Amino acid sequence: MKLKPGVFFHYLELDSTYSLLTVRSANILLQYFRLLDVHNKNTLNDVQFYHFLRHVSDLKKREIMLIFEMLDRNASGEIGFNEFYMLVCILLANQNHMEKEFISRHACAMFSLIDVDGSGAISPAEFQAISFLFNMKGEDLNKIFHEFDVSGDKMLSYTEFKLFALECIDMQEDTAKKTPTLLNRFLTVCKGAFC
């Protein structure tokens, strides 16, 4: 899932510590939501939501409607600003390659979002259905699911999902340590030039 080039979401800032929008960006997003809300109901219906996501992302119709169903927990046919805000945070986390950090920081919200049927556990089908949200591939997802299904019941409880979320942040930190920063590369080059 990627944002299309040229959409204004590229200018919104996602705080790296909390994986949430900065106050300035949240205010801009609220104004944008109000512009989309042509019926003045403080909600977006499925048609508005579909056209919004088609305009800003590369998602297909099936994926957009799945996201709408996930966000519309009370089956009212509309989503409010809170759900819209969460979706934009997920989009920006993907854009900034902070998917794992986002999952870790917001494990409870992500668990309830993924658990579409409200059973209190995530099935393999539910886990597979959201793979596009976090740019995960099918075989990677199956491996992750079975690795964290500690109880072996072919369902992820919240505790097992939380373990997955904590592992995500550890993997993110390991990747960051392995990838030298621009400053470290510069210092290495300078050290080699003067020694």
Image (cartoon, helix red, strand yellow):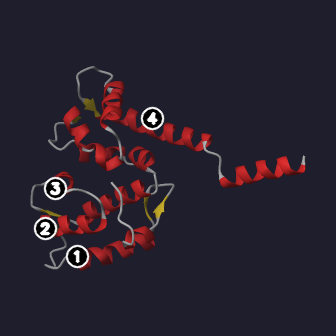
Q: Earlier in the sequence, mark 4 or mark 2?
A: 2
Q: Amino acid at mark 4?
A: Glu
Q: Position of residue 3 (x, y in %)?
A: 36, 62
User: For the residues marked 3 and 4, what is the alpha-carbon distance in whole angstroms?
Assistant: 29 Å
Query: Which SS class for mark 3?
Result: helix
Query: Which SS class for mark 2?
Result: helix
Instruction: Tell me the tag on residue 65.
Output: 3
Q: Amino acid at mark 2?
A: Val
User: For the residues marked 2 and 3, what is the alpha-carbon distance in whole angstroms?
Assistant: 10 Å
Q: Earlier in the sequence, mark 1 or mark 3?
A: 1
Residue drawn at x 65%, y 46% is 180
Of labels 3 and 4, the one closer to you: 3
User: For the residues marked 1 and 4, what is the alpha-carbon distance in whole angstroms?
Assistant: 37 Å
98 above or below 138? below
The picture quadrant where one finds residue 100 is: top left
Residue drawn at x 16%, y 55% is 65
